[in-house]
Amino acid sequence: MLILGLNMFHADASAAIVQDGEVLFAVAEERLNRAKHYGGFPAAAVRACLDFAGAKITDVDHVAVGQDTDANLAKKVQYALSNPAKILNFIRLRQRKQAMRDVRSLLSQALEVDAGQLRFQEHHLEHHLAHIASAYYCSPWENAAGFSYDGSGDFVSTMMARCQGSEIEILDRVYLPHSLGSFYTMICEFIGYKKYGDEGKVMGLAPYGKDTHCDQIDEVIKVKNGKFQLDLRYFKPLGSNQGMQVLPDGTVRLARHFSDHMVRLFGEPREVHAEITQRDMDLAYAMQVRFEEVFFHLLNELHQRVPVPDLAMAGGCALNSVANGKLFHRTPFQQTWIQPAAGDEGLAIGAALHTCHSVLQQPRRYVMNNAYLGPEFSETRIEGALRQAHLKFRKLGREPLLEAVAGQIAAGNVVGWFQGRMEWGPRALGNRSIVAHPGLPNMKDVLNARIKHREWFRPFAPSIMAEYQHEYFEYDHPSPYMLHVYKIRPEKRAQLCAVNHVDDTGRLQSVSHEENPLYYDLIKAFHRRTGIPVVLNTSFNENEPIVCTPEEAIDCFTRTRMDVLAIGPHLVLKSES
Ligand SMILES: [Fe+2]
């Protein structure tokens, strides 16, 4: 049985294909059409899914969409009626969304197939239920608490659930305009980070701040009876799309979230390219502190209702790896399974798996053991691309390649590492990564000057051999998808100085041999040379979506000052090219 999952006409459009309960392939459209956070119809992603499965759209039995325009309709209508100025906008938005529901015509147009030949059944699933499904049905658990939170989706910002066997029972929702994601976005915008997806950057700024504005920021969001409420004086009215708009070309645009009340309290907002002041850092600090307090309040309430040790979690806010790292001592939960594509691209997998298990009652047999669900390219294609670019390369066996690359990293060189299937989700996890020495004091500046051009306050991440995590970090709970930030043990901080953030933490990727044997063995080869079981890992890109194809990797290698490219079995040295 073939099920195609979709996230469409929403930020991070994506597609995933599930065969007999197993996720075969999943990809976000941005990686294929190169438009960051693309929010249109994921035509290229659908084609890639079908190609991988060796199927045609006419073979697909079910199509599942992680959006249901009829969900929470009474709440939406009630909201529109209480804001007369928004009624027309609400009607227009609804008409547009209804048109988008015609999945049959959209797929027949995109794939140039007569709609009459399509035999699939269509399913629409509420946004946050799809988020929770994307975590729970990929976890190994039969019994867990489910939690999803983000800016908004189908008029909801937060959902709590009980997950048991094949079922996910919704226990509670927080409706718009109250949204922890919008709280975070509002302050990010105020301090000059206005683009969709900028929140992750500001998380790195927070530890530079001090406790000067915490009391004031506490007023913006209040907790009550296991839920929370925004004080709307701090926000501009955001409408039923909560200030997020997808333009006809698929670009995602954020409306201004903060109100003049914020300006009266804190002064003028920071302009995008202006210097970051202590006030901005202090606001980032207060925002992260309050976010965590509300998050833990919600999780403690959820644990009261579902008293189990395991938490399955997704939603854009679940990418807050700093909060995730503190979860084990601030709540009773002992284990987390967080969907690597916790943002909205993950809806495609959630919708497909929910249809499989809850709607069609197919047994669960799949566990997502790694995030390498994207496209892969043959040696022939890679070799062709290298020749096309007139690069001098050597083809090496597995061990010589690992030794050569480990030697280059140990010597302080920056390596583009392009191997196997592309990662699913926003993090590079050792298949589309730039790797470097984690213990050289100038490595962060070198990477920023030569390739990444990132803000000075953003840390780089460590990939660590899983069995050494305990020696280096204060928590043992694995972080396979770089979704937990832990303190680095004091005696190891010098060894990891290029990945040790200002608050002595690291957003680690724990790498096991089973998940990624080649990447694990690369770190092991580096460990043999240096005594450090860690490499610095940052995404293979330069201000663009992470590279997907060999051509994109080669292009990034040649236009930046990367020293080495290891692409499949081929090694390219910049000094020889
Ligand atoms: Fe979402």
Image: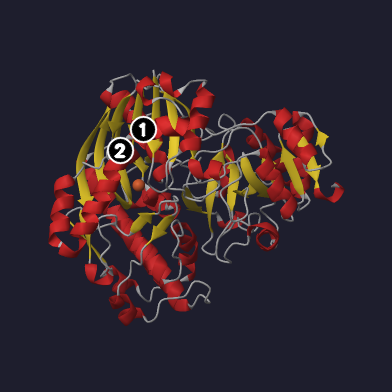
Q: Is residue 168 left or right of residue 281?
A: left
Q: In this view of the protein, which residue sits in the foreground, 482 or 267?
A: 267
Give the image quarter of residue 135: top left
Q: Specify the label residue 184 is tagged with.
A: none
- Looking at this view, name the residue that lies furthest to the right: 576
Give the image quarter of residue 352: top left
**Image quadrant containing the N terminus:** top left
State the SS at label 1: helix
Q: Position of residue 392 (x, y in %)?
A: 84, 41
Above or below for 433 versus 211: above
Q: In this view of the protein, which residue sits in the foreground, 266 or 74?
A: 74
Hey, what amino acid is under mark 1? Ser
Q: Is residue 576 left or right of residue 95?
A: right
Which residue is denoted by mark 2 in the rendering? Answer: 101
Q: Is residue 521 left or right of residue 348?
A: right
Residue beneath the point at 47% across and 77% down: 278
Q: Position of residue 280 (x, y in %)?
A: 44, 74
Q: Position of residue 337 (x, y in %)?
A: 40, 38
Q: Specify the label residue 105 is tagged with.
A: 1
Hey, what amino acid is under mark 2? Arg
